[in-house]
């Protein structure tokens, strides 16, 4: 606590809470862009916050990404809790396997003794295939689970970087660019004002379902994500808690 106060992190947390319009921001020292261990620190903090919810929150939707993977490495609970259920927030297969929502959901379940629900679908379905898929009972079952989600844990990324990481088609990249997308979270791309400019055509949690969750943990750090974080929080659900680092926080304060 003393170190945090000395370094002004507590003040920065209060400033960011008001800038982003949310009730809680946790800032870890240093910048994960420069020091990779900082991402593990973000993961550890997010893991502790999530573990504290396990008593009353049982259905937890999770997205993919390296920051989410850092949380799964840090989860540890005393005794296995079979009542926990981790749900992959998206069916996407576009990313590296280790960083897919499906893999993360399985890893969270393994660490906690809970169960998991995955959804294996390509990231880029045609309109016809998408319409057909949505009628499938397994997809309907996922959609019902998203409706009952208590907690959503998700990463935030830079829009263009995510389009590349997902091997998006030229047509998609064009939509993302021309729409002025700055950030990406759970398959949605947002412009600088937080307006949705594009959404990946695959089955996944809807923004309205995220908004219905009682707690949302957003995990993203590094100075390079400052613009993306600002963009996302222009329209983010208020029960969101942001777990970030000093690198992102300082840059956000500079930009605002
Ligand atoms: O692809 C899953 C995802 O959570 C995206 O929604 C987000 O933009 C990205 O990963 C964040 O990835 P990372 O934590 O590796 O920066």
Image: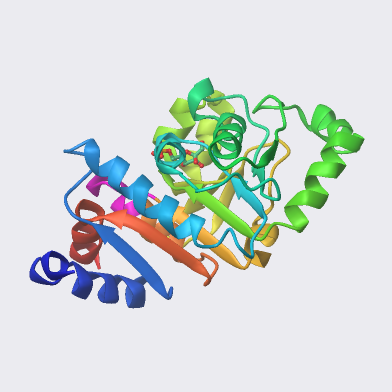
Q: For residue 222: magenta?
A: yes
- Main secondary structure of the magenta stretch: helix
Residue drawn at the location 20% of the way across and 57% of the way down:
251
Does residue 58 lie above or below 24 as drawn?
A: above
- Quarter of the figure with residue 13: bottom left
User: Where in the figure is residue 204, as x and y percent of width and height?
Assistant: 69, 42
**Residue lying farthest left?**
6
Residue drawn at the location 51% of the way across and 32% of the way down:
173
| 211 relative position to 233: left or right | right
Position of the C terminus, as image quadrant, is bottom left
Residue drawn at the location 44% of the way across and 59% of the way down:
49
Position of the N terminus, as image quadrant, is bottom left
Given residues 15 and 213, the one toward you in this image is 213
- Quarter of the figure with residue 133: top right
Q: Is residue 180 in view from this perspective?
A: no
Q: For residue 207: magenta?
A: no
The residue range painted magenta reads: 220-227
User: Where in the figure is residue 187, as x and y percent of width and height?
Assistant: 58, 42
User: Where in the figure is residue 224, as x and y percent of width and height?
Assistant: 26, 44
Does residue 129 lie above or below 4 as drawn?
A: above
**Residue lying farthest front?**
79
Residue drawn at the location 18% of the way across and 67% of the way down:
9
Does residue 152 lie above or below 125 as drawn?
A: below
């Amino acid at each position: 606590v003393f170190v945090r106060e000395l370094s002004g992190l507590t003040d920065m947390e209060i400033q960011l809470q008001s800038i982003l319009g949310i009730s809680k921001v946790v800032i870890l020292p240093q910048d994960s862009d420069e020091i990779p261990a900082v991402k593990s620190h973000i993961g550890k903090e997010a893991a502790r916050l999530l573990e504290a919810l396990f008593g009353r929150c049982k259905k937890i939707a999770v997205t993919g990404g390296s920051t989410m993977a850092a949380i799964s490495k840090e989860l540890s609970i005393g005794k296995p809790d079979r009542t926990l259920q981790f749900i992959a927030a998206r069916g996407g297969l576009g990313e590296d396997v280790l960083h897919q929502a499906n893999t993360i959901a399985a890893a969270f379940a393994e660490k906690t003794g809970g169960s998991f629900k995955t959804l294996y679908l390509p990231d880029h379905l045609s309109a016809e295939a998408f319409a057909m898929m949505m009628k499938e009972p397994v997809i309907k079952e996922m959609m019902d689970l998203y409706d009952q989600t208590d907690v959503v844990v998700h990463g935030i990324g830079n829009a263009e970087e995510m389009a590349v990481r997902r091997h998006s088609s030229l047509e998609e990249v064009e939509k993302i660019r021309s729409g002025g997308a700055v950030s990406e979270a759970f398959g949605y791309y947002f412009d600088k004002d937080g307006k949705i400019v594009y959404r990946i055509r695959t089955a996944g949690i809807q923004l309205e379902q995220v908004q219905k969750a009682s707690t949302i943990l957003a995990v993203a750090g590094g100075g390079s994500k400052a613009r993306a974080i600002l963009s996302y929080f222009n329209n983010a659900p208020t029960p969101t808690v942001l777990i970030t680092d000093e690198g992102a926080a300082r840059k956000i304060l500079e930009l605002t």
